[in-house]
Amino acid sequence: MKKLLFCICIFCALNTNAQNYFITFAGTGLSNIVNSVRVENLTTNDFITVSGSDVLRLTITTGVNSIDNGQSWGMKIYPNPMTDNSRLEIVPPTSGNVIITVFDMIGKPLAKVPSYLENSKQVFRISGLNSGAYLINVTGVGYRFSGKLLCEGKVSGGINVEKISTNQATNVITLKKDTKGTMATVDMAYTNGDRLKFTGISGNYSTVITDIPTSDKTITFNFIACKDGDNNNYPVVTIGSQVWMAENLKTTKYNDNTIISLVTDRFAWLELMVPGYCWFNNDADNYKDTYGALYNWYVVNTGKLCPTGWHVPLDAEWTTLTTYLGGESVAGGKLKETGTTHWTSLNAGATNESGFTALPGGFREPHNLTPASEGGAHFDSLLIGGYFWSSTENITDYVWAYCLKMDKNSVFRNYYFNRYGFSVRCLQGAGLPALTTTPVSSITQTTASSGGNISNDGGAAVTARGVCWSTTANPTIANNKTNEGTGTGTFISSITGLTLGNIYYVRAYATNNTGTAYGNEVNFTTSLAIGDSYQGGIVAYILEPCDPGYVPGQTHGLIAAPSDQSIALIWGWCYSIDGLGAAGTALGTGNQNTIDIIARCPGLTAASYCSDLVLGGYSDWYLPSKDELNKLYLNRSAIGGFDYDLWWSSTDTWVQSFSSGAQRDDVVRYYNCFVRAVRSF
C-alpha cells in the first residue's frame, strides 16, 4: 500500500510540472493525405520525422532548469512524462567515468550503463521503459545526480540507454505505428516560444509551414505542384500573399523540355552572352541537391526557366517579400536557414521564421577580378552568401538581384552584371512582364519618340503595350498613353500633344492577366530644333551654355523671318553722325542696336523695316547684331532662302558675306545690302 501511495505521489508531482500541446496534421489542395511530416525546432535545431497520421505531443516541462554549455554542472530529463523515449542531458563538474543507473520506484536497479563524460553537455536517449515511475541516477567521481522519470507508454523489450551526442545534440527519431495500425502519439520536447518548421509530404508534393504553437491545433498543408523540367519536385512555402519555392532551383532543362547549356570552362563563362548554367566548382555531386544551380541572367530572361505555373520574381515581387518581413534591414535573418550546417558559424540573426530557408550557394563571377593565378570566372562565397536573380533589368546588361550574407541580418538589393551565375527561387503564378523603356528621341516642341522592350511576358500573354507619360513622375496608363499592340519584343511609340518647355516623364508599360508592369522612367523637356517653324518664323539658333541669356532648363534663342525683308536697303541716312550707339556685337544686343539706329537715322532703313515687321502675329522683330547675323550664316541651310551676297547687321556698318562667311565693317551706311529680320524667344 505504501509503494502504491508513493507511486501515485510521484505521478501527481510529475504531471503538475508538465504541459502538453497536441498537434495533428491534415492536407488540402492537390492532396488531402499527409504521408509524413518533418518537424524542426528552429530554436534548438532538434528535429523528428513522424507519420502524417500521428499525433505530435509537444511536452513542455516546467520546474526543470535548462542546461547549457555556460552552466557549471547539472542534469535534465525531458520529455517527462515520456511515451517511448526521453533525453537525458548531463553536464558533469569534471571529466571522467560515470555509471548511469535506472531504478524502479522501490529501488531495484533495472539497467546500469558505464560511460565516459567530458566536462561539457552530453546527451543520452532512454527508451524501452514500461509504464511506471523510475529514478535515474548518474554517479561520477565526487558527485551524483538524480531525477525522476514517468513513462506512460507500453514498450516490449529491454531498457536501452544510448549516448547520442557530446555537445548540442540533434535528436533524430524515426517513428512507426504500432502493429495494430492505431494512431501513435509522438513526443517532442518543447519550450514555449520555440518556432517550429513543419514540412508536410504527400507523394511528390511538399509544403512548409512555420508556427509557434501555444495550444492544441491542426497543421493543414496546402499541397501545390512545383515540378521542373527535370521532374524535380520542390517544397513550397506561403509567405504573406506569395507562394515561393522553399529550395534553390536545380533544373537542367527549361519547362518546355529543351536543354539549358552547361558551361564548365572558365574562359567560355567569361565571355558568355547566351543562356548557360553551372554547378558550384563544377561539382554536381557535392553541391547540386543542396544549393541548386548557378544560372546567368540570359537563362532567366527566356521566361522558361521555372516550372510551369511559376516564374522568376520581378524586382517588385522581391520587394513585396522583404516588405512583408519588415523591410530589407531585418528580412535577411527571417529568410536564412538556421544553424551552421550550411552557413558559416556566424550566421547572424538567422531565424528562418518565414520558412524560406535561404542557403548560401555563392556565385560564379563573370569578370577576371581575381589574381591571375586563379583566372577569371571563379566561384565564390559558398557558405558565406546567397545571391538570387530577379527578372528585372535596371540598365542595359545589369539586373536587380538580392543577396543574403552570413554576417548580416539584412537583405541587400543591388544590380549586377547579367553574366554572373546566381541562384534562383521561383514564385507561383504568372508574373508581371519585365520590360525597359527606350530613351526619348526626336524631341520637338509638341512631339517626341520613345518605346520599350518587353524581355519577358511573366508567364502570360501580353495583351497591351505602349508608353504612358505625364508632367509628374511615375506616369501610369491612367495618364496619356499609346497602344502598340500585343506580345513581347521591341516597339516604338510616338508621343504627341506636348507643350514646349515642359518636363515630361515617360514609362513603357505591358499588361498581362496578372496586371500592368512598367519599365524604367525617363524624362525629357520638349524643345525646338534649328530649322523648325515656330512663332512666326524659323528657329535660327538655340542658346547653349555660356551664351549670353542662357538659362539652364529653359529653351531660348533666335527666330529668323522665313524670307528676306529686302534685297536693297541702306543701313541709315546718318553717315556723318558719330556716336550712334548700335555698337553691340554679342547675342542679345541686336534689338537695342535697332532702337539706337531708328532714334538717330530717320527714314526707311534696314533697322526701321525690321522694327515695323509683323509676322505670324509677332511684332518684336529687329535687325540682328554682328554675332546674331553670324548664327544665321552658320545655319543658313536649315533656315533657307539666303543668296550669296552681303547682309546688314545692326552693329554699326558691319556686314557679312553669305558666300564666304567673311564679316567686314568698311561699308558705308548708305550702301544697299540684303536684310533678314530676327526676333528672340
Image: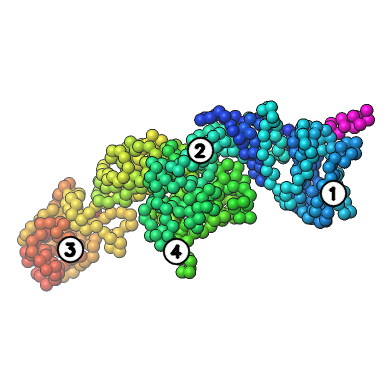
Q: Name the residue under label 1.
A: 99
Q: Is residue 677 magenta?
A: no
Marks 4 and 2 close (CB-CB < 8 Å)? no
Residue type, numbered disc 1: Ile
Q: In this view, does 356 lie above or below 673?
A: above
Tell me how far mark 3 sits from mark 2, CA to CA: 65 Å
Residue 645: percent from the left, percent from the top?
A: 8, 65
Q: How many marks?
A: 4
Badge 2 local density, few (<14 within 10 Å), some, or many (20+)?
some
Residue 36 is at least partly visible in this image? yes
Q: Mark 3 points at which residue?
A: 634
Position of residue 386 in the picture relative to residue 666 (left or right) = right
- Tell which of 597 and 156 is nearer to you: 156
Q: Which of marks 3 and 4 is in front?
A: 4
The quarter of the rendered structure image containing the N terminus is: top right
Tell me how far mark 1 sits from mark 3, CA to CA: 106 Å
Residue type, numbered disc 3: Leu
Residue 19: percent from the left, percent from the top?
A: 75, 33
Marks 1 and 3 close (CB-CB < 8 Å)? no
Lower position in the chain sequence, tag 1 or tag 3 = 1
Tell me how far mark 3 sits from mark 4, CA to CA: 53 Å
Q: In this view, does 398 lie above or below 431?
A: below
Give me the residue at 83% from left, 42% from top: 111
Q: Name the residue under label 4.
A: 376
Badge 1 local density, few (<14 within 10 Å), some, or many (20+)?
some
Q: Which of marks 1 and 2 is in front?
A: 1
The part of the chain drawn in magenta is 1-15
Q: Considering the numbered disc 1 on the image, is that residue within a helix, a strand or a loop?
A: strand
Residue type, numbered disc 4: Gly
Q: Name the residue under label 2.
A: 243
Q: Is residue 2 magenta?
A: yes
Residue 619 is at least partly visible in this image? no
